[in-house]
C-alpha cells in the first residue's frame, strides 16, 4: 500500500510539472541547439520583419525566417506538408483560426501552454493549448483626413450609404477575406441583407487584403471604409499619411485574435514554442503596435487605447468561421460584389 501511495504521488508531481510546461530558459536552450526557426505569418510583411529582428536580438543564435502573406494561401501549403508527412515550416500565425481548429482535429498540432495562457479570453485560445491568440485586431472605420472633415466621419454603417461617399468607399473582398466576411456578417445581422443592396448602389470599391484598403484611403483614391484593420491604418498614419481610424458609437466592434500554433513533425519545434512564448510575454504584449490589443487580461494596451473589453464587441470569430453555412455565405457575397479583379499584396 505504501509503495502504491509513493507511485501515485510521483505521478501527480510529474503531471503537475507537465501541465506547467517548459520554462523560457528550457526552450531557449533547446532552440539554440535547433539553431533556426521558420514561420508563416498572415498579413503585411513589415510587422513580421520587425518581430523577427526583435526576437533575434532577444534570443541570439537562432536564424529566423518569417514569410508573410495571405493566410488563405499559407493554409493550403501547410495542408500539403501535413499530407506528405514532411513539415517545412515550424509554426504559423494566421488570421484563419478555423484552420487551427481543423488541424487540431487532425492531430497535426503540438500542445503548449506558455506563461500567461490562463489570462487569455477563451474565445482566443484552445483549452488544450494546441493554438492560442497572440494579439487582438479590430475592424474600425478609417478615413482620409485630407478629404473628410471631422463632422463627416461616419458614426454607423448606415452613414456609408450617404450619396457623398458614392465611389469613395473601399473594403476587402468579403468572399476572399475571412475577417471582412466576419465584419460584413455583423452588419448583416443588425441591418439585414437590404443594407448591401443600398451599399452596392453607392458604387463601392473592393481590393484584396487590408493593406490595399488602407493604402487606397491614404492615396485618396477612396475616402472612407467600414472595413479596416485598425493596426494597418495606424501604421499608415505613423508613416505620415493622411489617415485616421474611428470607432462607431452605434455598432458593435468586430474583434478577432491572430492565432499561432506549432506543428507536429516541425524541424524546430522548440524555437517555434519559444517564439510564441515571447509573443505572449508581458514585454511584447505591452509594446504591441498602435491599433493592436494584448490578448492577456493582465496587460494594459498601449498607444492610448482603451482595454478591448471596454468596447461593445462582436467576439465570436472562431464560432463564426466554424459554423455551418459559411460556404453559402461566401457564395452570396461573391454574387453580390462580383469576382476578384483588384488584387492587393502584403509588401
Image (spheres, helix red, strand yellow):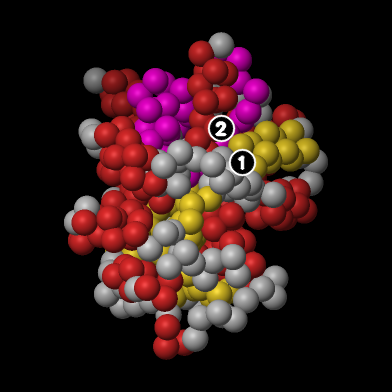
Residue closest to the eye, 75 or 147: 147
Q: Which residue is mark 1?
A: 69
Residue closest to the eye, 289 or 278: 289
Task: Please state the extent of the stretch shown in magenta in the rendering.
Answer: 85-111
Q: Name the residue at 57% across, 25% down.
A: 77
* Percent of width and height locating residue 127: 33, 40
The number of numbered discs placed on residues in the rendered structure image is: 2
Q: Callout 1: few (<14), some (14-19), or many (20+) C-alpha neighbours within 10 Å?
A: some
- Asked which secondary structure carries label 2, the reply is helix
169, above or below 87, in the image: below
167, above or below 206, in the image: below
Q: Name the residue at 50% across, 35% down.
A: 72
Q: Name the residue at 48% across, 60% down.
A: 170
* Percent of width and height locating residue 32: 74, 36
Q: Name the residue at 47% across, 27% down.
A: 109
Q: Callout 2: few (<14), some (14-19), or many (20+) C-alpha neighbours within 10 Å?
A: some
Inspect the magenta stretch and tell me whether residue 345 lies in it: no
343, above or below 210, in the image: above
Q: Which residue is mark 2?
A: 74
* Percent of width and height locating residue 174: 40, 46
Q: Is residue 154 left or right of residue 237?
A: left
Q: Which quadrant does the N terminus fall into? A: top left
The reply to whether residue 50 is visible in this rendering is: yes
In this view, which residue lies farthest toward the top? 84
The reply to whether residue 139 is visible in this rendering is: no
- Asked which secondary structure carries label 1, the reply is strand
The Cα–Cα distance between marks 1 and 2, rounded to whole angstroms, is 7 Å
Inspect the magenta stretch and tell me whether residue 108 lies in it: yes
Tell me which numbered mark, 1 or 2, is placed earlier along the sequence.
Answer: 1
Amino acid at each position: 500500500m505504501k509503495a502504491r501511495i509513493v507511485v501515485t504521488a510521483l505521478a501527480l508531481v510529474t503531471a503537475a510539472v507537465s501541465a506547467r510546461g517548459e520554462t523560457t530558459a528550457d526552450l531557449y536552450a533547446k532552440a539554440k541547439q535547433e539553431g533556426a526557426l521558420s514561420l508563416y505569418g498572415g498579413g503585411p510583411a513589415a510587422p513580421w520583419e520587425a518581430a523577427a529582428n526583435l526576437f533575434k536580438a532577444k534570443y541570439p543564435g537562432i536564424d529566423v525566417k518569417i514569410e508573410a502573406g495571405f493566410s488563405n494561401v499559407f493554409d493550403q501549403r501547410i495542408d500539403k506538408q501535413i499530407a506528405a508527412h514532411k513539415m517545412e515550416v515550424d509554426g504559423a500565425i494566421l488570421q484563419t483560426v478555423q484552420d487551427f481548429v481543423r488541424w487540431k482535429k487532425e492531430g497535426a498540432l503540438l500542445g503548449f501552454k506558455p506563461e500567461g495562457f490562463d489570462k487569455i479570453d477563451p474565445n482566443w485560445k484552445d483549452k488544450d493549448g494546441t493554438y492560442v491568440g497572440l494579439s487582438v485586431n479590430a475592424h474600425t472605420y478609417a478615413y482620409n483626413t485630407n478629404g473628410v472633415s471631422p463632422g463627416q466621419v461616419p458614426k454607423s454603417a448606415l452613414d456609408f450609404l450617404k450619396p457623398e461617399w458614392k465611389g469613395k468607399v473601399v473594403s476587402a473582398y468579403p468572399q476572399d477575406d475571412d475577417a471582412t466576411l466576419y465584419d460584413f456578417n455583423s452588419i448583416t445581422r443588425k441591418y439585414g441583407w437590404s443594407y448591401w443592396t443600398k451599399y452596392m448602389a453607392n458604387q463601392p470599391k473592393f481590393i484584396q487584403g487590408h493593406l490595399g484598403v488602407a493604402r487606397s484611403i491614404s492615396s485618396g483614391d477612396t475616402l472612407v471604409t467600414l472595413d479596416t484593420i485598425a493596426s494597418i491604418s495606424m501604421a499608415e498614419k505613423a508613416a505620415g499619411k493622411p489617415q485616421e481610424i474611428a470607432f462607431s458609437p452605434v455598432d458593435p466592434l468586430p474583434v478577432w485574435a491572430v492565432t499561432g500554433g506549432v506543428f507536429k513533425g516541425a524541424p524546430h519545434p522548440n524555437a517555434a514554442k519559444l517564439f510564441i512564448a515571447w509573443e505572449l510575454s508581458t514585454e511584447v504584449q505591452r509594446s504591441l503596435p498602435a491599433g493592436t490589443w494584448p490578448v492577456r487580461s493582465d496587460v494594459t494596451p498601449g498607444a492610448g487605447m482603451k482595454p478591448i473589453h471596454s468596447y461593445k464587441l462582436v467576439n465570436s470569430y472562431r464560432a463564426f468561421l466554424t459554423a455551418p453555412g459559411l460556404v453559402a455565405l461566401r457564395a452570396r457575397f461573391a454574387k453580390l460584389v462580383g469576382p476578384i479583379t483588384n488584387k492587393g499584396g502584403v509588401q
